[in-house]
Image: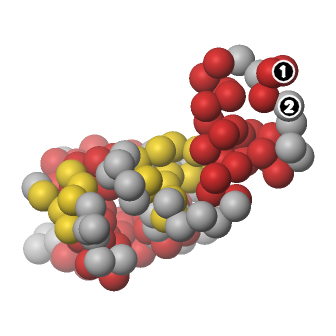
């Protein structure tokens, strides 16, 4: 049985990826679950569910299923797979205005690159272009991931 998912749910799961959480697709229901590192650690430590709050119990129970590798859950691309830096770099090179392109390219190296970049897209009035570009890049990552994992999706 092939599950059909909403592409927007996959995209949202990708956007919520962080250093402290990961998103997983439940292949039976099509739901995208945001899993915290805390819940994964509690599941690994086999923490008694009775000692947890109700919402934590549910999350830790799901984390245990993920760790058991039952095949019911599949990991979405991580924030490292998404690689925001590469998306920023491609955006800089895609701009028609060479001056702004050069300025943004110079700003995205070294510590603080993300903050400098964000400030500059506002300063130079290309924030709408940036967010549209990033949204399209994330959408393409979601579509590619679905195809690689034989998951049907609807827009």
Visible residue check, residue 16? yes
Kindly identify which residue carries mark 1.
51
Q: Which of 122 and 22 is in front in this view?
A: 22
Answer few, some or many: residues within 10 Å of disc 2's Cα (few below 14, many 20 plus, some between 14 and 19): few
Q: In this view, does 98 lie above or below 113?
A: below
Q: Where is residue 85 in the image (x, y as percent from the top left)?
A: 46, 69
Q: Dot 1 lies on which element?
A: helix
Q: Residue at x 88, y 46 (%)?
A: 45
Q: Where is residue 66 in the image (x, y as percent from the top left)?
A: 62, 57
Kindly identify which residue carries mark 2.
48
Q: In this view, does 137 lie above or below 90?
A: above
Q: Which colour scheme is used?
A: secondary structure
The residue most toward the top is 53
Q: Dot 2 lies on which element?
A: loop
Pointers 2 and 1 in contact (C-beta within 8 Å) = yes
Q: In which quarter of the image is the C terminus?
A: bottom left
């Amino acid at each position: 049985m092939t599950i059909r998912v909403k592409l927007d749910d996959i995209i949202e799961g990708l956007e919520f990826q962080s250093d402290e959480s990961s998103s997983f697709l439940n292949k039976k229901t099509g739901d995208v679950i945001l899993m915290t590192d805390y819940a994964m650690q509690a599941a690994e430590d086999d923490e008694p569910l009775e000692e947890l709050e109700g919402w934590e119990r549910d999350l830790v129970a799901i984390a245990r299923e993920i760790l058991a590798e039952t095949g019911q859950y599949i990991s979405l691309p991580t924030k490292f797979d998404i690689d925001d830096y590469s998306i920023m770099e491609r955006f800089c090179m895609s701009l028609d205005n060479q001056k702004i392109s050069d300025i943004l390219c110079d700003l995205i190296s070294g510590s603080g690159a993300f903050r400098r970049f964000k400030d500059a897209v506002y300063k130079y009035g290309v924030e709408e272009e940036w967010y549209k570009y990033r949204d399209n890049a994330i959408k393409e990552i979601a579509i590619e991931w679905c195809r690689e994992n034989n998951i049907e999706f609807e827009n």
